[in-house]
Image: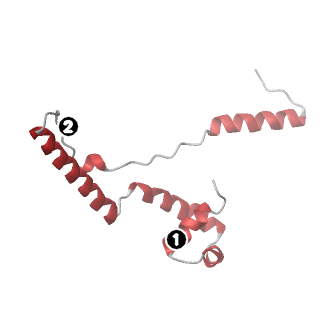
């Protein structure tokens, strides 16, 4: 992932030049406010997304009607809510990372892990 990818997304969302966006927002504001907000926007379809889903549902319905008159078996009917995509981000593996970090510190200080 590019270091500036989040900043570029924020600058695009705010319609600002990248440098002006980075100068007008603190790192804490960016990390704690803007990044969670922009992550949630993936699961909120825009007006364009809704129109495209309606077009896809209509195309599927028409193709389904053509299959009824043809020799192919028609597909199941699809609703608009079934066309909405859900984006899920992977959860960070904190326990594994913490165990590796803790083991590294214990080795660096010369202690052994309790078993």
Cα gap from disc 2 to disc 1, whole angstroms: 40 Å
Task: State the image coordinates of residue 4 (x, y, percent, origin top left).
Answer: 64, 63
Q: Nearer the viewer, residue 106 or 20?
A: 20
Q: Nearer the viewer, mark 2 or mark 1?
A: 2
Task: State the image coordinates of residue 28 (x, y, percent, origin top left).
Answer: 63, 65
> According to the image, label 1 marks what residue?
12
Q: Is residue 90 above or below residue 13?
A: above
The quadrant of the rendering that contains the C terminus is top right
Q: Are marks 2 and 1 in contact (CB under 8 Å)?
A: no
The image quadrant that residue 33 belongs to is bottom right
Task: State the image coordinates of residue 19 (x, y, percent, origin top left).
Answer: 65, 76
| Dot 2 crowding, Cα within 10 Å, few <14, some 14–19, many 20+ | few
Q: Is residue 104 left or right of residue 70?
A: right
Which residue is rendered at x = 29% and y = 48% of the image?
Answer: 83
Q: Nearer the viewer, residue 20 or 100?
A: 20
The image quadrant that residue 78 belongs to is top left
Q: Residue furthest top?
A: 115
Which residue is rendered at x = 59% and y = 68% of the image?
Answer: 29
Q: Residue furthest front?
A: 70
Q: Is residue 29 above or below residue 75?
A: below
Q: Which mark is residue 38?
A: none
Q: Secondary structure at mark 1?
A: helix
Task: State the image coordinates of residue 75 (x, y, percent, origin top left).
Answer: 20, 37
Instruction: Of the two numbered discs 2 and 1 on the same chain, state the one appearing first in sequence.
Output: 1
> According to the image, label 2 marks what residue?
75
Which residue is rendered at x = 58% and y = 61% of the image?
Answer: 32
Which residue is rendered at x = 83% and y = 34% of the image?
Answer: 106
| Dot 1 crowding, Cα within 10 Å, few <14, some 14–19, many 20+ | few
Q: Secondary structure at mark 2?
A: loop
């Amino acid at each position: 992932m590019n270091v500036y990818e989040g900043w570029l997304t924020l600058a695009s969302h705010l319609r600002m030049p990248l440098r002006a966006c980075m100068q007008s927002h603190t790192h804490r504001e960016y990390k704690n406010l803007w990044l969670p907000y922009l992550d949630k926007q993936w699961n909120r379809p825009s007006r364009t997304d809704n129109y495209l889903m309606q077009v896809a549902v209509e195309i599927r319905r028409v193709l389904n009607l053509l299959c009824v008159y043809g020799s192919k078996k028609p597909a199941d009917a699809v609703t608009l809510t079934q066309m909405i995509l859900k984006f899920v981000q992977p959860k960070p593996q904190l326990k594994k990372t913490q165990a590796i970090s803790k083991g590294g510190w214990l080795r660096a200080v010369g202690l052994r892990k309790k078993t």
